[in-house]
Amino acid sequence: MLAMKPVGRNAAALKYDLLTVMGAYALAQDKGRQRLVLRLMTLVTARYNWARDELAVGQREIARLWQVDERTVKREMAKLRAMGWLRVTRQGARGRVTEYSLCIARILEDGRNRWADVGPDLVQRLDGSAAEPDPKVVPLPLKGRAEPPDLSEGTEWALAKGMLHAEDPARYTAWIAGLERRGRDGGRLSLIAPSRFHATYVATHLTAWVLAAAQAVDAGVAELVVEW
């Protein structure tokens, strides 16, 4: 596949191809996913620094651009992270906004089944078929990697699972994919593991990682309980 860095002689073509693939992908999805991708496309067009692979915009500014409240911005950005389309490169702090990078290879791969609908010229550019004729060499999906979780439920656990999958597919496959949401009691999020050993391992070794993902989606989550 073509190198996924939008700089140099082919930068302009890659930018247009990326936006085209995003749009084509969105048009094949439900209305909720279409709106999410449209919001990202607008944000990228307006504020993404292609040369530095940097998206550094405050939630208030994004809310104004998207015509939503800041709570919706937080949730939508979490969905994009869960999809693996955005990655945090620098966490926000007082006086500094969170910085993201755009996962271009993942976006193009997710939209791969729409490439041919756009045209053979786009397929040739993105596949790099002249330089890499082996069609078996693709970056995604990785062998042994679990499928991304279904985000359509919209619960804090569904979105958190998406983020965990994007951050560490192998660890997600081994320990997170089998966890199910039991329920929510105030700030306590309860999960069910398939076995006592599984529950004990997650509670002992992965609680901080899982809790951080849940809190990134829903700041109201204060405690994580894993049962079996």
Image: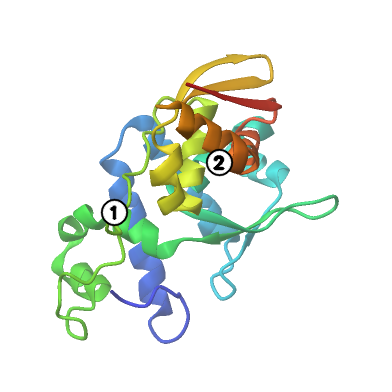
- Horizontal arrangement in the rendering, residue 217 relative to residue 61 (left or right): left
Residue furthest right in the image: 94
Q: Residue at x 31, y 44 (%)?
A: 147
With respect to residue 50, does 158 lie above or below? above
Q: Amino acid at mark 1?
A: Gly
Residue 96, given in percent of the width and then of the height, sits at 79, 55
Toward which corner of the image does residue 209 lie, by quadrant?
Answer: top right
Above or below residue 49? Residue 90 is: above
Left/right placement of residue 188 relative to residue 44 reads right
Q: Is residue 84 left or right of residue 30?
A: right
Q: Nearer the viewer, residue 113 or 220?
A: 220
Real-space Cα distance between discs 2 and 1?
Answer: 25 Å
Q: Residue at x 37, y 66 (%)?
A: 16
Q: Name the quarter where the N terminus is drawn.
A: bottom left
Disc 1 target residue: 144
Disc 1 on helix, strand or loop? loop
Q: Is residue 19 left or right of residue 117?
A: right
Q: Residues within 10 Å of mark 2 (few under 14, many from 20)?
A: many
Return the mark for residue 78: 2
Residue extending furthest top? 185
Residue 95 x %, y %: 85, 53
Ranked by sequence position, the earlier of labels 2 and 1 is 2
- Identify the amino acid type marked 2: Ala
